[in-house]
Every structure is written in C-alpha cells, then in structure tokens.
Image (tube, helix red, strand yellow):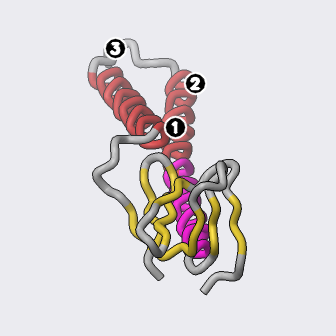
C-alpha cells in the first residue's frame, strides 16, 4: 500500500474554519475571564446570567471537540478510499489518461492517483474506476 499525504499544501477551507473556530473559542475564554476579573464585588453579576454564560462556554467547548472528531473521521474515510484505489484502473474524465494506480497522494485539493507510468489523475467527478484492488 502506498498512500501518502502532502503536508506542504496551502490550508484548506476546513483548516481555515478550524483555526477561525479556535480563535473564536479563545476570544470567548478571554472575554469570560476578563468579565469575571473586572466584576464589581459589591454588585456581582446576576446568577442566571452567569449560568447562561457558563452554559454557552460549555456548548462552545463541546462544538470544538465535536468538529475535531468529525475531522478525524473524515480523514480516516478518505484514507480508506485512497487505499481502495491502489491496483485498480482509472480513466480521466476526458478519456485521454488511463492506467493502473500505483499510489495515491492526498493533497489540499483532494486525492491524486499516480499511475504506473508516472502520470497523475486528480480523483474527482467524471473519472472511471474499474477492476478489483490489488
């Protein structure tokens, strides 16, 4: 099995969204801590508002963790699909390039099948996959 991942690729929409979520999460934490530090001890925050903020904090934290787990599941699924291509014959959407898949590279743009002759086909809409995996 020869499945590789390109690590020097530019960030994808998923990584941009993850970093934005992380920034929003960090900003929320900073605001919450700042609010608690600067609260007037003689006139504390209403307990219902405090509980609502803690609930929102918990929700944000759970959403971040769930997104991380979903990203891991998606990556696992993509690796399984890439592995299933090795040894099969693929044909480009225009029918000009065809051959047996020797390896699959994962890039920010998706999967690229590398054929035995060294030619590459981006795995996407319109390609034909035939044969049984090696």
The one nearer the camera, 39 or 81, is: 81
Q: CA distance from mark 3 to mark 2?
A: 17 Å
The one nearer the camera, 67 or 7, is: 7
The one nearer the camera, 89 or 133, is: 89
Q: Which element is circle 3 on? A: loop
> x, y (%) of residue 52?
57, 28
- Asked if residue 42 lies left or right of residue 80, the reply is left
- Asked if residue 26 lies left or right of residue 133, the reply is left
> x, y (%) of residue 86?
56, 76
> x, y (%) of residue 6?
35, 58
Circle 3 or circle 2, nearest the eye: 2
Circle 3 or circle 1, nearest the eye: 1
Residue at mark 1: 60
Magenta segment boundaries in residue numbering: 66-85
Q: Residues within 10 Å of mark 3 (few under 14, many from 20)?
A: few
Q: Which element is circle 1 on? A: helix
The tag on residue 48 is: 2
Q: CA distance from mark 1 to mark 2?
A: 18 Å
- Asked if residue 77 lies left or right of residue 105, the reply is right
Give me the residue at 35% from left, 34% from top.
Answer: 26
Q: CA distance from mark 3 to mark 1?
A: 30 Å
Residue at mark 3: 42
Residue 82 falls inside the magenta stretch: yes
Give me the residue at 49% from left, 44% from top.
Answer: 64
> x, y (%) of residue 73?
57, 61
Decide which of tag 3 and tag 2 comes sooner along the chain: 3
Residue 99 falls inside the magenta stretch: no
């Amino acid at each position: 099995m020869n499945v590789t991942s390109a690590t020097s690729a530019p960030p994808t929409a998923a990584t941009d969204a993850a970093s934005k979520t992380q920034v929003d999460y960090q900003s929320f934490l900073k605001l919450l801590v700042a609010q608690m530090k600067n609260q007037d001890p003689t006139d504390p925050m209403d307990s219902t508002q405090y509980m609502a903020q803690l609930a929102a904090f918990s929700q944000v934290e759970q959403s971040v963790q769930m997104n991380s787990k979903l990203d891991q599941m998606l990556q696992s699924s993509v690796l399984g699909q890439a592995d299933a291509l090795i040894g099969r014959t693929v044909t480009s959407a225009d029918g000009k390039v065809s051959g047996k898949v020797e390896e699959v590279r994962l890039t920010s743009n998706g999967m690229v099948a590398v054929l035995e002759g060294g030619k590459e086909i981006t795995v996407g809409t319109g390609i034909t996959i035939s044969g049984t995996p090696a």
